[in-house]
Image (cartoon, grey):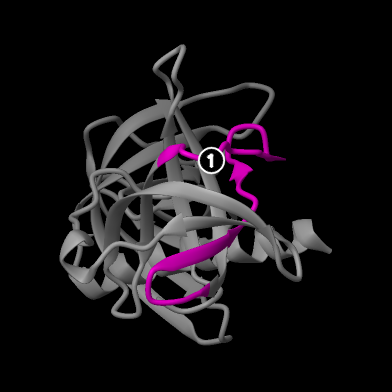
Amino acid sequence: MKIGTLLNLELKHDKTGKILKYRCKVVEKNEDYLYIDYPIEIKTNKTAFLQKGSLLSVEYVGEDQSVYKFHTEIIASVKLNVPALIIDFPRKENIKRIQRREYVRIETAIDIAFHGSKDSFTTVTSDISGGGMSIIIPNDKKIEEKEEASVWIVLQMHSGEFQYVTALTEVIRVKESESRASTASLKIISITKPDRQNIVRYCFEKQREARKKELL
């Protein structure tokens, strides 16, 4: 794991039992510990001050673009160049490579070509994740729930390179609106592993960019 790696954290609230989700990044590391900046709660977008002894579930994208998960504990707080938390870094055998059932979802407008059973058009997304996306439906176009559609997506990565992703999707929900643009939620039902990894990497890069802007 490299310094700068983005981590997604989950913490179970002691009183309510709710799962609280945070994001942070690795600012320093050694063989036994990771030093992370103070996490941002995803729901409120505010800095969280987690207590020593808090038990966390951690997910991150490795250098091979696979998703990994481990469980850890907050050991202490420390001041480096920025205030940081120390968490236990488990041995390799205790870090699991997982098949994601849930993916990081980000709000972003990406160019997309939609090829449905009845209509085809170009539009943009309103959000995207490794498991699916929401798209804006042009005023003169029609999409039906449960129809299958091929989508072509253009991802501009942080490096400046473009990745062209294709996927077979199913329309899960159509949300029509008179005052705002209508949207459709698409679930990915077939995609190559490299293409899904490119979407996951794109989402993590966008999260990292947002995090950097918050620190400015």
**What percent of the width, then of the height, locates residue 191?**
20, 63
Q: How busy is the neighbourhood of tag 1: few (under 14 within 10 Å), some, or many (20 plus)?
A: some
Q: Amino acid at mark 1?
A: Lys
- Residue 44 included in the magenta stretch of the image: yes
Q: Is residue 115 magenta?
A: no
- Residue closest to the eye, 7 or 118: 7
Determine whether the residue tagged by mark 1 lies in a helix, strand or loop: loop
* Residue 196: quadrant of the picture: bottom left
**Front residue of 30 and 43:** 30
Q: Quick one: quadrant of the C terminus?
A: bottom right
Left or right: residue 162 versus residue 114 is right
Instruction: Tell me the residue that label 1 is attached to.
Output: 52
Tell me the residue at 69%/23% (across/down): 179
In the figure, 81 relative to 49: above or below?
below
**Whole-percent x, y for residue 77 in the image:** 63, 52
What residue do we see at 43% from left, 50% from top? 104
Residue at 36% from the left image edge and 37% from the top image edge: 143
Residue 97 position (above or below residue 102): below
Which quadrant of the rendered structure holds the N terminus?
Answer: bottom left
Above/below status of 155 relative to 214: below
Residue 107 shows in the view: no
Q: Residue at x 29, y 62 (%)?
A: 90
Residue most toward the top?
16
Which sits in the foreground, 100 or 117? Answer: 100
Measured as percent of width and height from the top left, residue 37 is found at 63, 58
Q: Which residues are magenta?
A: 29-55
